[in-house]
Amino acid sequence: MSEAKTIKVTLAKSLIGTIQAHRDCARGLGLRHREHTVEVLDTPENRGMINKISYLLKVES
């Protein structure tokens, strides 16, 4: 069985001064603080959150 694809996401900028919806997206991805890196599944839901706050993130496949 093939393994599920993941995306490595790093919070590159601070959440201070961002709107609440963008903070919620970061929290939904599991990002807690600046320079925190997580691996999330490559799903449409996670892609949408990544696209919404792309100006705050560094993304690797």
Image: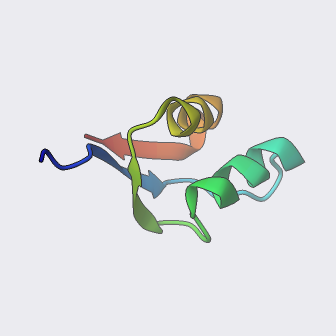
Q: Quadrant of the C terminus?
A: top left
Q: Is residue 7 left or right of residue 29?
A: left
Q: Is residue 19 visible?
A: no
Residue beneath the point at 49% across and 54% down: 12
Residue 34 rendering spot, x and y as whole percentages:
56, 66
Q: Position of residue 25 (x, y in %)?
A: 69, 47
Q: Is residue 17 visible?
A: yes
**Compared with residue 40, is residue 61 higher up or lower down, i.e. above or below?**
above
Residue at the far left: name it: 1
Specify whether 7 is left or right of 31: left
Relative vertical location of residue 33 with respect to residue 51 in this rendering, above or below? below
Residue sitting nearer the eye, 31 or 3: 3
Residue 37, placed above or below residue 23: below
| Residue at x-position 53% and y-position 40% | 46
Coordinates of residue 8 in the picture (x, y in percent): 33, 52
* 3 left or right of 16 in image: left
